[in-house]
Structure formats: C-alpha cells, structure tokens
Image: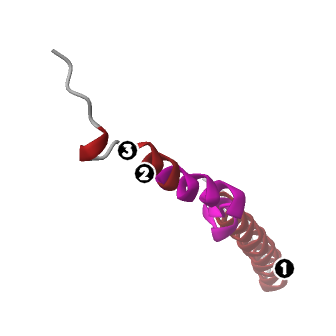
Amino acid sequence: MKRQEISVEKLLGIIEEKDRRIAELEQQVQWFMEQIRLSKRKQFGVSSEQTKIEQINLFNNEEEETHNLAITEQERIEVK
C-alpha cells in the first residue's frame, strides 16, 4: 500500500474548510430551531386560545333565561 505525502499547508487548508462548513451548518441548525420555536408558539401560544366577549355572554344569558322558566311550588297543577 502506498502512502500519499500531504503537506502541512494542505492539511491546514482542509481543516479550515471543515471549520467553515461546521460553522455554516451550526447557523442552519440555529435557524431551523428558531423556526420550530416560532411554529410551536404560533400553534400553542396564548393567541390561539383567545375567546371573544360575545361568546362568553352567550352562557351568562342562558342561566337567566332558564331561571325565569322554572315553575315555583305555587304554580304547579296537580293532574289526576
């Protein structure tokens, strides 16, 4: 088997290229992680759980209406 002689300068160039590529990939990972965080915040954040006041008022009026329909003891009629 034949060994190839590689100069120190060439090895340093290879290392520098690999370091540059690692830094580029780390930046991409950071960008993707930020996109995931923003996506989760949009999907599960507070803004997706907001309720309109009109919807809340629907239930408040329901109790008052059913209370008015209730028959008191004096109004009951006995049927034989």
Label 1, secondary structure: give it: helix
| Quadrant position of residue 53 | bottom right
Q: Which residue is mark 3?
A: 70
3 lies left or right of 60: right
**Is 48 placed above or below 46 here?**
above
**What residue do we see at 64% from left, 69% from top?**
46
Disc on the earlier residue, 1 or 3 = 1
Q: Quadrant of residue 2?
A: bottom right
Q: Give, as a three-letter code, the residue at label 2.
A: His
Q: Amino acid at mark 1?
A: Gly
Task: Give the x, y percent position of residue 44.
Answer: 60, 61
Mark on residue 13?
1
Q: Residue at x 72, y 74 (%)?
A: 30
Q: Main secondary structure of the magenta part?
A: helix
Q: Which residue is mark 2?
A: 67
Please name the residue shown 77% across and 78% down the image. 23
| C-beta proximity under 8 Å, tags 3 and 2 | yes
Magenta segment: does it hold 60?
yes
Residue 52 x/y as whole percent: 70, 61
In the image, which residues are magenta? Answer: 44-63
Dot in front, 1 or 3: 3
Seen in the picture, residue 50 relative to 14 is either above or below; the reply is above
* Residue toward you, 74 or 62: 74
